Amino acid sequence: MFEKISIHTPRQFVPPNINIGDWTAIEPLFQQLEEQLKTASTTEKIEQVILNWEELSAAIAEEGSKRYIAMTCQTEDKNAEKAYLEFVEKIEPEEKQCNFRLAKKLTKHPNCKQLKNQRYDIFIRDTELQVELFHRENVSLETKTSKLGQQYQKIIGSLTVQFEGKEQTLIQMNRHLEETDRKHRQKAWELVANRRLDEAEKIDGHLNDLAKIRNQMSENAGFPNYRDYAHKRLGRFDYSPDDCISFQNAIEEEMVPLLRELQEERLQALEIKELRPWDTATDPQGLPPLKPFKTVSDLIDRSQAIFNQVDGNLADWFQIMQDLDLLDLANRKGKAPGGYQCSLDESRLPFIFMNSVGVQRDVETLLHEAGHAFHAMASQNEPLHSYRHAPIEFCEVASMAMELLGSEFLEEFYSIEEARRARIAHLEGIVFVFPWIATVDAFQHWLYLNPNHSVEERDNAWSNLIDRFGGKVNWTNYEPAKAKLWHKQLHIFLHPFYYIEYGIAQLGALQVWANSKNNRSKALSDYKAALALGGSRPLPELFERCNIRFDLSRNTVAPMAELLRKELKALKN
């Protein structure tokens, strides 16, 4: 799969032919780093140790990424699964312990403080956090959560239903929810909902096991609950759990009313008395579903045409990904759900994974993941592996802004009228996703602040949040499906508390888009300059370089809600 790629910069410390999948080959390199740090008498020598350490970290990270990609591309491949689990079980735990020892020695080094004043302030800050949070007993627990997460992906990736005479994945079934025949949509929706409910007990059991382990991890680290531990562990230096709650409230106050307005419009247009779960994706004017492409190659070619118009640098980067076979975009049985961009850290190249089935959402997803890929390409020349990764809250600005910037050229996929429909669907999707983000985040707050809850209490907590943030959708007679709807949100299982970032970033992306309407050239210049910084500066500074505000209050949410309201009105009139 990766035959065409090569290491970006020749190794200076890691031997060229080392087997990164063999811990006995890696461990002596960590021992060398400890000895180098022990004898480093100047900041220059410490800096060289850091560069060597980062080179090794990048090599290990790339090996892990390749195995993860192979496993998710084909979850039924026993060899790929074995290779991934071996890395998770035999390499990652040992690496974490060695990294901790190095981090501890570095932070205690007498010359460490001087490094803070020489572009290493963020690196030292993050290293100090690593030392603070490391607990040896948590290493094996983290391995267990990784394995449980892989099992969840395997279950979800294997789910299919028989519909219209053929076997279809649950992702493939999404396109049926866009059909104009309401009975057709209902039948498709019910089939998928019931298939998920067939696995509900098993998936609930996975969450119970994950929550138990995570609660133990937070207790081991001396935190009162996993929520506070997770926020600290995610490196949220610039906002707190209380800020997240304020953000949830701002979404309820500003975005949920807009959501209800759009749902009322949909009710009127569809000429129905109540909005049901299978009525939210179809075109409200009764038009057939948008079908932007038939083949994956068509999706790629038309997306390339969009990037050609957005920006020359971005277009070149996307072409490089094609040339190096760094795209796996088609949905198929046995493929893990969702979409992601994964960095190959030593090659300094991105890989895009998704499950396209020929719907508008696929276009948005590729634009989104391409934004992440452009982030990786923009920061290629940063020597530090750590600095080539920005905080997630800004990584998602890169991706979500690209959705909006790219949407200006959707005529590459559609007629003028179809492009208008696609833009409406995209902007309405942004309105819809803010309340969903608030729901998922609030649910996780409840989940880990009530560690002894029952499955029934958990179902009720989720259902209450759907009532709070879900607008006008009527779930009567489908309460069990409503209560388990969170089962499809893989972040809850794989990446706990990593979801509010999407809302924070969406605020930033909307600001980039607003800036582009005033001065497109400057907005793109600011965007690329901010991406090039990677993670070398604090989160608020990254937002500032992009000429946008880092703020989670109603002061920022309200004008962005109004921007969406205004743009949607213009598109519909």
Image (tube, rainbow, N blue to C red):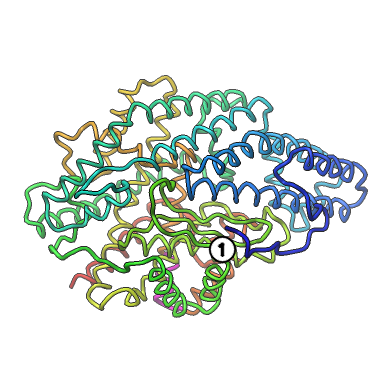
| For residue 391, side relative to residue 334 (left or right) | right
| For residue 242, side relative to residue 295 (left or right) | right
Asked if residue 135 is among those painted magenta in the image, a careful observer would answer no
**Closest to the observer, 205 or 371:** 205
Measuring from the top left, give residue 260's x and y in whole percent: 20, 51
| Quadrant assignment, res 309 | bottom left
Q: Residue at x 54, y 65 (%)?
A: 325
**Closest to the observer, 15 or 365:** 15
> Mark 1: which secondary structure?
helix
- Quadrant of the frame with the C terminus: bottom left
**Closest to the observer, 25 or 269:** 25
**Crowdedness near tag 1: few (<14), some (14–19) or many (≥20) residues, C-alpha within 10 Å:** many
From the image, tell me which residue sits under label 1.
375
Position of residue 204 relative to residue 285, above or below, is above
Measuring from the top left, give residue 71's x and y in whole percent: 52, 45
Position of residue 475 relative to residue 4, above or below, is above
Measuring from the top left, give residue 57's x and y in whole percent: 71, 48
- Quadrant of the frame with the N terminus: bottom right
Q: Residue at x 73, y 36 (%)?
A: 100
State how many labels appear. 1
Q: Which residue is drawn at 83% across and 50% down?
A: 49
Measuring from the top left, give residue 371's x and y in whole percent: 49, 64
Amino acid type of the residue that numbered disc 1 sits on in the rendered structure: His
Residues shaded magenta: 511-520
Q: Main secondary structure of the magenta part?
A: helix
Q: Which residue is drawn at 41% across and 77% down?
A: 518
Position of residue 81 relative to residue 293, above or below, is above
